[in-house]
Amino acid sequence: MIELEAANFYKVRSLFEPLMAHQMFCAGVLEGLYKGRVFVDNADTPKSAFIAQGGVWWFLAGDADNAAFNQALNSALFNRTVTGEKGWGGMLVCHPENWDAQIPVIFAPHIPITTQRLHYTCQHLQVDWRSQIPDGIEIRFVDQSLIEDGIEVQGAADILEARQEAIEPDRRAFGYVAIHRREIVASSVINCIVNKGGDIGLFTNPDHRRRNLAYLTSAAVIEYAFSHGLEMVHWNCESFNIGSIRTAEKLGLQFSHTHSMYILILNPVRHELNRAWSYYDAGQYEQAMAVCLSENAPVHPEAHYIVARCHLASGNHDRAVESLVLAVESGWDSVDEMQADFVTLTNHPSWQMLLGQAQRNALANLS
């Protein structure tokens, strides 16, 4: 596996063109707009290639049946050639689809975390979002005025920094936020812009969901995008993220295609826990519990906590309590998370005992 100089990135462009159409960070690296690394099997005539951008966005293209390259990539991932010493892992998208069969080889000994992603596009926006802003909510553009007004920018800080560093800020990044009582409770940003196309990302505080805020901030940022030179906005979400799907449809976005994303976390315990969570998020509770209860399951209180969440979601409260007992006895200490996730158990006879043990765990970890 050979790393190309930036001047030679053009040699892999034909391999990645199908991904460049909808993966903006992939396109950004090959267009020279974003820093990235490109690894190939042959420096002169590459047949297989791998792109790493920002430490976490990974892309594979070309000949999937290149065993030597796949094994070399496996070594480069696990010896941290790709991620660096502080890197946690990455999220991988491939073309063509026959790479799917090789991901277990490239990620071995970890079992890949596989998710299905839906891709939507938008080329025009015809919604009256301003008339739908609820009382007590303010929709604002991300700029220095937020700081001047004493608002903690939190997740919008990266957008502010990117705009301050850019000669042409609107070609680098922009965003809108929803503010409630001087606190940012939702945001939609476009922070990857390539060839008049932008990739949108959004977040809503869990306490403020189902208030239309993702729709409002997304509409605002898409409207801004089209009035400032962009011609296409890309929207990606998990196939089980009903809220995101409904928001995309309400905005009038067009469904494009489904593709797989593979996640690798280099820490083996964290990887298995996240693999279980991925099943849980998709509503596949039996699979999530199988990961946590297998012979090779991670020895971690979070494994018991995930099993408890699965039992609760399946309507088995007593089994959920049994697993929560194991979680707190093995060190689970996130009291706020437990209270939020298990609201329906607050009247259970064991609840106060469970809460008390979690609180003691938290205090012990502070000392």
Image: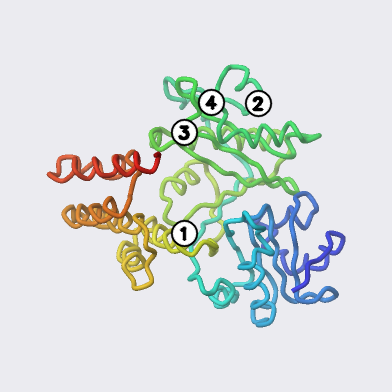
Check residue 259 in the rendering and tell me which mark sits there, or answer none. none
Cα distance in 3D space between marks 1 and 4? 37 Å
Of 132 and 289, the residue lying toward us:
289
Tag 4, which secondary structure? strand
Using residue 145 as the reference point, say whether residue 282 is left or right of it: left
3 or 2: tag closer to the N-terminus: 2
**Disc 1 residue type (three-letter):** Arg
Tag 2, which secondary structure? loop
1 or 4: tag closer to the N-terminus: 4
Using residue 176 as the reference point, say whether residue 41 is left or right of it: right
Cα distance in 3D space between marks 2 and 4? 12 Å
Which residue sits furthest left?
Answer: 349
1 or 3: tag closer to the N-terminus: 3
Cα distance in 3D space between marks 3 and 4? 9 Å
Cα distance in 3D space between marks 3 and 2? 19 Å
Q: Which residue is the site of mark 4?
A: 139
Mark 1 vs mark 4: give the one in front: 1
Q: Which residue is the site of mark 1?
A: 270
Cα distance in 3D space between marks 1 and 3? 32 Å
Residue 341 sits above or below residue 31 on the image:
above
The coloring applied to the image is rainbow
Where is residue 188? Give x, y as percent. Answer: 56, 37
Q: Which residue is the site of mark 2?
A: 143
Tag 1, which secondary structure? helix
Which residue sits furthest front?
Answer: 367
For the residues labelled 2 and 4, say whether their Cβ atoms are less than 8 Å apart.
Answer: no
**Disc 4 residue type (three-letter):** Ile
**Disc 2 residue type (three-letter):** Asp
